Image: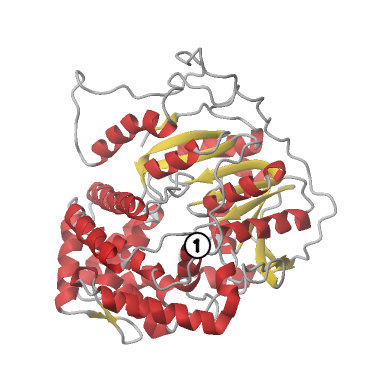
Amino acid sequence: MRRRGFASSPRAHLSRSTRLALATTLAAAALAGCTAGPSTRPEVIVNDGTGAHQSSQAPPPPPAVPLPALTPPQSPSIRWSDCTQDTRDRLGQPGVPDNLAFSCGKVNSTLDSPDLPNRGLARIAVLKVGTGPIPLVVVNDIAGDPGTLYAARLAAVAPPALLQKFSLIGVDRRGTGQSMPMMCVPAGVRQDLLDQDPASGDLDGILQAARRAGQQCAIDLDTATTALDSWRTAADLDQVRQQLGMTKLNAFGHGDGSKVLSEYAVRYPGQVGRFALDGVPDPSTDAAAVLDSVAAGLQATVTAFGQDCAQRGCALGADAGTAIGALVTKVRATPLITQDGSSAGPGLTLSAISAGLAQRARWPELADAISAAVAGDFTKLEVFSDPLSQETRLNPSRLDATIATKCNDSATRMPADQITKVIQTLRQKYPLFGDFTARQLAWCLPWQGRSEPLPAAGAPGAPPILVASTVVDPVTPGDGTSKAADQMPSAVQISWQGAGHGAFGNSTCATDAISSFLVDGTVPRDGTLCPA
């Protein structure tokens, strides 16, 4: 049931995902170069806020919780120190403007592993950028930039009004970045996990690598490996809130960083301030269906990437999918060589390309890197795959914490024969990325099963939560984000009809709506569409 005042809809008897499905279909078709005649084109539904067509038999909604006012911190306790140069070293390229300065700190939280509840210490790294009086906590994808670095990059593209009102507080999720980084998967095992040829049918090889990863992490970290999940990360954020001196947490989540915030809203509904979630993962428990949607999103993003390439006149041209397919075939026959002398086959090549597709601002760089790889030089593509595969002094590998968190967040352990069937099905549907996407099911099979029930969905009692979706998203597809929003009683959704991972910074319309929500408390109409 939608709440009165900020989420009424002229099609309230339909779920949000159903109401947006027609617009999503049209946008995806437009990105693929399709047309629809006026006599058959379905209506694009944009909420007009009238509440017309609501069922007269529906029970009255509960009173809406108002959006909290922004209040300055009281007695903050985080000790900040300048870390500008260190942050710039960690960022590497692409960098951020010279006028940005950064301060870093640490927050103590409880590790709270399932076997040792309420015990242990987790030290969480935080970064502050900007001089606004109100802290805005920033949480990113587990496989993306650590939150501290993501906040630094976000400050470079955020509207001035946002940075005048807020200081961005990037948080490295437990096990990532500078927050006691998880570094337990041997380098050779990472290579095996990432560079197994998805089309080889060698599930045993992937399972063996996943088993070695899980065993080594259990030896190195003991019960701490099971403490890396979104639910406990939400508890870390509440410690951050308290040490920032805030009665309410104001936060921005990107990708599955939004999942952490959605679970925070379930766990601490009374402490929710202004939450903007940009690309929430599909909450469905059917892992095969979720990965089907991700593979479809990757395939559709390749089409959009090709169209962008053609408009810029880049060497790949409009048919980027054919160029990528030819590159994969080439490296399958003759793997390329990385800078450290290891081989780069189809798996690592697709890992690099999928990482590049998720970063719309870097599409020109990705196009050049693919062209260079076609010519036999993998070094430019390697820049996109290195964060997952390589471990350095400044930046630990992201793969270790990604596997642990995603496996701990899921109760699904699919038998090997079913995984094989899913791989075959997705390969037929999505020749480029189907089996590449499905192989992730094998990563969790040997991992210790979740011993706790999954967190409840919903967050009743929370104020309006802004959810932004992107129709063609290679990481958190728009239909999955709509399903997640359907589970949140106070969610208000806007949908960018474009392509890329996340709408903020990619769509002016969505960026302005998110900024206005956070800064001014302007709640958009549920179902608002932002054009591509």
* Residue 78 visible to the viewer: yes
In the foreground, 326 or 440? 440
Q: Amino acid at mark 1?
A: Ile
* Residue 392 visible to the viewer: no
In the foreground, 384 or 232? 232
Residue indicated by mark 1 = 142
In the foreground, 373 or 109? 109
Dot 1: within a 10 Å radius of its alpha carbon, few (fewer than 14), some, or many (20 or more) residues? many
Percent x, y of residue 12:
46, 22
At a point 31% along the width and 21% down the height, the residue shown is: 43
Eyeballing the image, is 225 above or below 52? below
Query: On the image, which quarter does residue 462 sit in?
Result: top right
Query: In the drawing, does residue 192 fall left or right of residue 198?
Result: right
At a point 21% along the width and 79% down the height, the residue shown is: 335
Percent x, y of residue 139:
57, 55
At a point 40% along the width and 34% down the height, the residue shown is: 17
